[in-house]
């Protein structure tokens, strides 16, 4: 797992991540006060683009795209609530992780009962 760091409490921020295979992911995060939540405004990986996706506590919130992208995205919050505060990521109350393809496959095996 690759921990996503350098979060601030800015409502709009863009980060670029390099995967172990050398490819990169660009993610723009934004906080919507009226929705009380963090969203992925845009995630770009090669020709895959995801827009307007709410960040929630899940072991792999990108599970439904596992046949299109070789990574996942996990969110864990200390007090088991959803990341609803602007400072949740900057305060490390909530943490995002990029999952490797092996970790995505392990999660699929777990879901399948293997």
Image (spheres, rainbow, N blue to C red):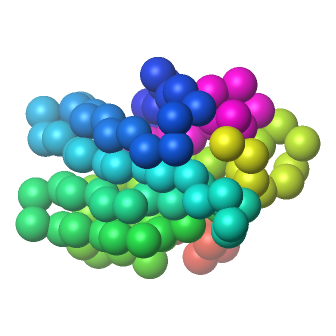
Reply yes or no: does residue 44 show up in magenta: no
Please state the horizontal and vertical placement of residue 46, each as a whole percent of the image.
Answer: 10, 58
Tell me, yes or no, if residue 102 can be seen here: no
The image quarter in which residue 12 lies: top left
Residue occupying the point 22% across, 68% down: 49
Residue occupying the point 55% across, 67% down: 54
Depicted 18 relative to depicted 59: above or below: above
Viewed as shown, does residue 58 lie left or right of 98?
right
Residue occupying the point 72% across, 61% down: 36
| Figure disc tally | 0
Please state the horizontal and vertical placement of residue 55, each as a whole percent of the image.
Answer: 58, 59
Depicted 50 relative to depicted 103: above or below: below
Depicted 11 relative to depicted 106: above or below: above
Reply yes or no: does residue 93 show up in magenta: yes
Q: Magenta stretch?
A: 87-102
* Residue closest to the eye, 76 or 108: 76
């Amino acid at each position: 797992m690759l921990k996503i760091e350098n979060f601030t409490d800015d409502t709009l921020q863009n980060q670029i991540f390099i995967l172990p295979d050398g490819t990169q992911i660009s993610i723009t995060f934004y906080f919507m006060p009226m929705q009380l939540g963090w969203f992925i405004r845009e995630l770009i990986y090669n020709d895959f683009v995801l827009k307007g996706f709410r960040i929630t506590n899940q072991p792999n919130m990108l599970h439904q795209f596992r046949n299109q992208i070789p990574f996942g995205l996990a969110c864990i919050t200390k007090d088991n609530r959803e990341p609803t505060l602007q400072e949740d990521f900057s305060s490390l109350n909530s943490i995002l992780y990029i999952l490797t393809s092996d970790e995505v496959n392990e999660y699929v095996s777990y879901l399948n009962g293997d």
